[in-house]
Structures are given as C-alpha cells and as structure tokens.
Image: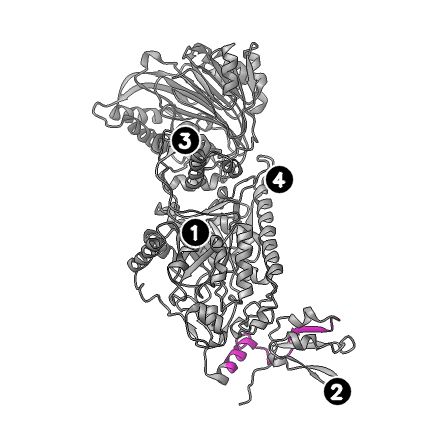
Amino acid sequence: MEELQRIANPFGDDKAMDACGLFGAMHLKGETFSGRDIIIAMANMCDRGNGLGGGYAAYGIYPDYAELYAFHLMFEHRRAKEATEAFLEEHFRIAEQGEIPHRPVPGVTDPPLLWRYFAEPRPGTAAPDDFVVERVMDINTRIDGAFVFSSGKNMGVFKGVGHCHDIGNFFCLEDYEGYLWTAHSRFPTNTQGWWGGAHPFCILDWTVVHNGEISSYGINRRFLEMHGYYCTMQTDTEVVAYAVDLLVRRHHLPVELAAKVMAAPLWTQIERMEPEEKKLYTVLRQAYASLLMNGPFTIIVANRDEMIGLGDRVRLRPLVAGVKGDTLYLSSEEAAIRLIEPGLERAWIPKGGEPIIGRLADARVSGQGAALLDQAQGQ
Amino acid sequence: MKSYVLPEFWVDRDDYRCIRCGVCVNQCSYDTHYYDPEDDVVRAREERCTGCQRCAVFCPTNALTIRTHPYEYRPNANWRKENIRDLNRQADTGGVVLTGMGNDKPLRIYWDHLVLNASQVTNPSIDPLREPMELDTFLGAKPDQVDVTCGRVQGSLPPQIHLSTPIMFSAMSYGAVSYQAQLSMMRAAGEYGTLANTGEGGWRRELRVYGASTIVQVASGRFGVDRSYLNEAAMVEIKIGQGAKPGIGGHLPGEKVTPPVAETRMIPVGTDALSPAPQHDIYSIEDLSMLIYALKEATHYEKPVAVKISAVHNAAAIASGIVRAGADVVVLDGIRGGTGAAPKIIRDNVGIPIELALAAVDQRLREEGIRSRASVVVAGGFRNSGDVIKAIALGADAVYIGTPALVAIGCTVCQKCYTGKCPWGITAADPRLGKRINPDIATQRLVNLLRGWSFEIKEMLGGMGINAIESLRGNRLHLRGVGLAEWELEVLGVKGAGR
C-alpha cells in the first residue's frame, strides 16, 4: 500500500485521533471459545464507535497451521493481489491459501479482497521473525493496494469499515474458536474509513487495540525514529505498538516494566519506594522519559501468551477488568462483560498506570487487584 | 575635549512635588542629581543618567519622571540617534564601545511567532491544582537502553542532576554581579530545587554551602578553578562561548576588580580580568574531549560536565561534536543572551537566535541518534514562562535565565552593568551599593519568580493534556508558527498555524 499516510491520514493532521470501545477475553489455560460472545459484547458498546471501523484479533484459531505464519491481507484490486502473491512466492513457501470467509452484512459495504496465506520463510532464512517484519513492511509500503492485517502464527486479525459487531458478523467470527480475543470499535475524528486503518494493529503475533489520544505523540514518535521506527500512518496506536516492540522485543524489558515506562509512576510515588525498586523506576523514567505516553489512553496489547490491559496513569479513559473461572475479561464498559458472563466472580477498575496481565504460562492474572483475585479464585 | 554626546534621558522633576529630601541625590550612583543649597533646588546632570529609574522608584513624592530625551537630529532612517551617539562616544575615546545586557535590536523574536496547543473535546485538559503535574527534570547523559535482569537495573546511569523546574540561573560571575546578587541566586536555586551558575569568576568559600545547587564554570580565564571548586559543585560547565559575545572572552573591567573580587578570581586588584578568546588548550574538538575527561577524572565521574557555546551558524554540527566528545549537557546561548560587559558591536551583530539554534541542534542530535546522550540547555532572551515552555517543546531539557532573575531583584535593563555602578546593587563593584540588595528579600523575589513561572508552565501543560514535562520536551506538534516564512518553519520543525 503506497502512501499509507495519505490513506490513513488524508487531511495531513498531526495524528489520526480515535475514541473507541475495547474488549478483550482470554482463557488462562488456553481453552478455546467461539467469537460469538465477543461480537455480542461489542454490539453492547456500539455507541462507542461511529461505524468507521471495527476489528478483532483472535489467537488459537489456526491449530492445524500452528507452525506457519498466517498472513491476513487486504487488496484493493486484483493487481495488488497478483503482485503480493508473486512477492510472497518469492520469499516464502506457501502451504495453504484462500479467501477469508465472509458473508454479506448490511452496514458493511464495498469490502476489499480479503485473503489469507499460511506460509513459512524459505528454508535457511535466519531470524525468521525479523524477516517477516521486514517483508510485511515491504508489502505495506511498496505494493500499491495491498495491506497486511496480521502476520503471526496461529492467530489472525479481522477488521474493516463498519460497526464492530457488523464486522464480526461479516467475517463469520462465531465459526472461529480462540483462547484469546481482543476487539475494537472505532470513533475516528479525522480519518475517512479505510479497512487497513481499523484496529487491531498487528506485527508478528503482537496486536494492539487502543482507545485514546496520546498528547505526547510528537516526542514519542521522534524518540522512536531515533531507534529506527518510522511512523508511516501517524496514528497514536502505531507509536504504542512500536514502543512495546522496542521495550519488550529489543530491550528485553518484562511487559510489566514496559507498561511502567508508558504509564510511569509519579515521582512522588517513586520517592516512597524501597531503595532497589526506587532505583529501577528512577532509571526507567530517566532513560525512557520520551516514551511516557501522556494523555488519555487505554490499550489492550496481546501476544500468543499474554493479554495486557493498561490505562494512562491518571486514568482518563475507561478500563474494567473481570474474572470468571479461568477467563479474564477486559473492557471499556463493565456492562459488556456482564452481558456475556452474568456469573462474573469479580469486576474491578484497575488503577491508572497499573497493568493487568493475563498469562497463559502460569494461568494467572497479575497486576493490581491480583491478590484479591487469587482469593476469589480460591473460593 | 567637549563631548558631542547628548543626554539619553530627560529628568523631569515636578518642583511642586519635590520636598528636597535628597533621596534621588543619594540613590543615584552616577551623581545625576545634586542639591543646590543656594537656590534650594534639586538639579540634574542629565548626561549622566542611564534611565535606571532607581530615583523615580525611591522618590517619596513621585516627583520624578525619567523619560527618553526628546532631542531630535534630522530624521534619517540610516543615521539614527544610536549610530550618531555611538560614533561620538568612540570619537571621544578611541575605544571599543562597551555595553551590558543582551542584544536590544529588533531581531525577530521567534517566541512571539510560536503559539501553543490546548486540548478540546478529544482529550481532557488537566487541572494542575487538583491533579499531579510533574516538572521534574534530570540533566545528564541517558543510556539508549536500560538493562533490567531479574527486576534489577544492571549498572548505573551517568550522573544525573535533578531540577524541580526546568529553569536555572545563568552564569553570572562574582565581580560581574555583586556578592549579594550571587548569594541570592544561589540561595533561591537551593530553596526551589534548581541550579545557579557561578560564572567564571571563582566561587567564594562562604557560598559553597550552596554547592548542591551550584554549577561551576571553567572558562578560558580559569579564574578560581581548583580541585575543591570542581568537587564542591553539582555540575561543571566548560564555557566556550557566550551568546552576547561569541568568539571573544570575558571582560571584567578593572574598576570592578575590588579586593574581594581579586581574591576570588586569584588576580591583582584593579586589573582588567580579560579571559582569552579561545581556551588555549582547546583548538579543536579532540582537545575539548580531553578537557571534558580531565574534569570528569577530577570529579571522579560523579558530576555531569556541560559545554556551553554561543549559538552560531553551524551550531548543530558543533553540538554533535560536543556530544561525541563526551559532554553530558550541551548549553546553547543565543544572540539575545545577556552579559555584564561586551563590545556593543559584537553583542549586536554576532550569533543567531536561540530558537533556530535549538531547533537545529535538537533535530541534528536526533538524526544522528545521539540526542539521549546529552541534555540540551538553552539560554539567551527568555522573558516569561511562555518562552520557556516553547523552548521545551522545541527540544530543550531546561533553560537558563539571567536577565529575568536580575529584573526580579530590581534590574531595569539599563545596559550599564559594565560601569560597576549599578544603582540597584546588582552589578555594582562598590560594596556599599551591593548592600542595597537585601539577600533575604532578593531570595524571596527569585523564589517567587521560579514559583510563578512554574505554576504558569503547569497550567499550560495541563491545557495541552500533559502531566509531565518530558512529554512536551521536543514535542513540536504542540507548537504552530504564525507569520513565519517556509524556511523558518522548516528550521523550527513546526507547522504553520491552521495546518
């Protein structure tokens, strides 16, 4: 897709702003469930979007191809498809391909061509993850009319222009079984609808859905540029995605600390910490000052092992967490969770800047309120 | 020889109000006013008046109005009063015309062409009176990456200096300013949690109790520099240049080198303290690196080392070299930067505006990927908190203020600092004049200045929906230009308003 910025930000604003509804659900032991409930939850928060974008990330949906990169792509025309397929053939061994199933839904009009490919890099490719990232950037920036929705293993992103629940129905998400779902409905203030511009944003198996406007965007972007990330679409969400990639994948910070960089504790809080902890947070704030995300935001970041909910440090955008059995829910509104899980054991509003993390590995929720959760789970 | 210089100011004394109390006579250190007992009247020698307004402020009956002298030459756009006056002064003496304070010419003030953003609807503004608002700033080199293993930071950062507000007091040496003025700035800096700079005039022993809030300067004269001078301060600054006089050294006229000044600078009484134009051990960038590391060795790598340059044409490339040479802080002083004494021709004609230099340096350091390796501090021409916050948005970590601090304790920017006769006691060499500053009151006024500006910065930050200063630093999307040409917007890295 050439000139992403022209499409994603046609008026050349500083950044494309969104207000939104978010939802996430994760079974901490990896049991899969249908996307039906997620669509219902998003329908309940329909008013948080304005019909200009909705999308889902689903993990665990392609167990038969779990070892292959699943590429979800959109093409604006046949030429884009042909060019992309030639490009993929050149760099990858494609095991399986086909159109992403969808059905006509009122309210979802004029979809692009939607295809998926299960592929692996040609044998002998060193650092396949980096290779995939680079090829995805190639397709997005060089092939006119093509855009990669997602590129992780055993997961996929489904998104488009329309209300979120309509998009879910359009993609027949009730037919998929996943253990981790995130969803997003969009209320853009300055972009025209473009299928690629809907959330989630994805690179490898990292996805981000985001509600907010990041006032620090200008410096976050300039800092990331120093580290080789170029924000082509000028959306807030893009800087969040790159910041997570830089901190977690390249600088090997635990996700909890990456969250504490983006939503840093106040200096007055750091002052009261124990010496070792105080040193840690002081150094993080000093070194990564330019990655502090200021202004209102809530994000749900996910990868194959984790789902992380995080709000800005003064909690200017909503986030509710809830637990039932082994399932962790994150949502903009509590009602959406209760609608699909009336027997919710516990729901709480995390403090600003406190990440809520659901982990597959230890089947646990960590973060603020987690101790109470353990209690709840024990009962 | 009869001087052809006409008085600059007109002393308008309302004889009906004047009570012959003699306050003006005593207050004017230039002997402008005198009492004529024969006629029982107070008269003025107007050619001596500097327009400092000391007499007008202290006149108990408001009998005095000091105005620009209304004399007129034939109107001429080229030969203005100032040109004729300077030329006449030069013909009188054959010397270099000296002046004090910053450039007073109508160069474009870019701060006045930059406007700030505020949140509306999509983003809530934040009320700093009710919610946290952080101005904490750390000066020093930052690593590109933090290594955290098992929840612990490995290694430690280079030395960092905490500022509770991104505003520091500029380098003003003892000798250029009075003891009381310097004492007040150091006390105020300590009280408010920021730093004051000694300048290059040494550091009085009794002022070293304020070491934690003091920057010591190492300039080409090396006045007063020894091991304890370096080690008792919070930070060391190598002064290469000063915005008011790029390319030349410091000038402290002999009239101001009194016994205590001489002792502090370690020079003979009454001699001109002329710092060499360059540092004679720095003829190239690698020499600078050697001095930086010599100072780091001398201070056991416990203190950040700053390098201050005047903002000149290729400041960006020079700053890059300074960072690569190992400086923890780069200080840029723009063409409107102040001075206690400088050749007027240099002050008025050499250097570039700080706004453009700052924008170019910040951008260059980012393009080279080394912006984190040093903090950037800017100086030269700040008048209010609006200028400061715009500098932060352009990319500065902190600013130095000189003139605003002096104005807070009485200065009226009369530009006669080099005479050593400052009637306000600020740049006075005469200890009796220095005593006109009550350090308790001056400290309070300076703290009030820092407090007031900090409040205003917090209000503006909150308006932008930002609650930590670092989220504005270098965040030029919060700036827009008004009335600027395309090339100026490009250098500043900001869009025009409405875009």
* Residue B127 badge: 4
Q: Secondary structure at mark 4?
A: loop
| Residue B85 magenta-highlighted | yes
Tell which of A234 and B191 is nearer to you.
B191
* Residue B376 badge: 1
Q: Is residue A71 visible?
A: yes
Q: Residue reaching furthest right?
A: B16
Q: Secondary structure at mark 1?
A: strand
Q: Are the residues under badges 4 and 3 in a single subunit?
A: no
Residue stretch rendered in magenta on the structure: B61-89
- Marks 4/3 in contact by CB < 8 Å: the verdict is no
Q: What chain letter is assigned to the residue under label 3? A: A
Please state the total of marks drawn on the protein image: 4
Q: Are the residues under badges 1 and 4 in a single subunit?
A: yes
Amino acid on which the number 2 mark rests in the picture = Asp
Q: Determine whether B77 is above or below B322 in the image.
A: below
Residue B483: x %, y % from top left? 54, 55
* Residue B39 badge: 2
Tell me which label, 1 or 4, sits earlier in the chain: 4
Front position among marks 2 and 1: 2
Residue B343: x %, y % from top left? 46, 73
Cα–Cα span, label 1 and label 4: 28 Å
Front position among marks 3 and 2: 2
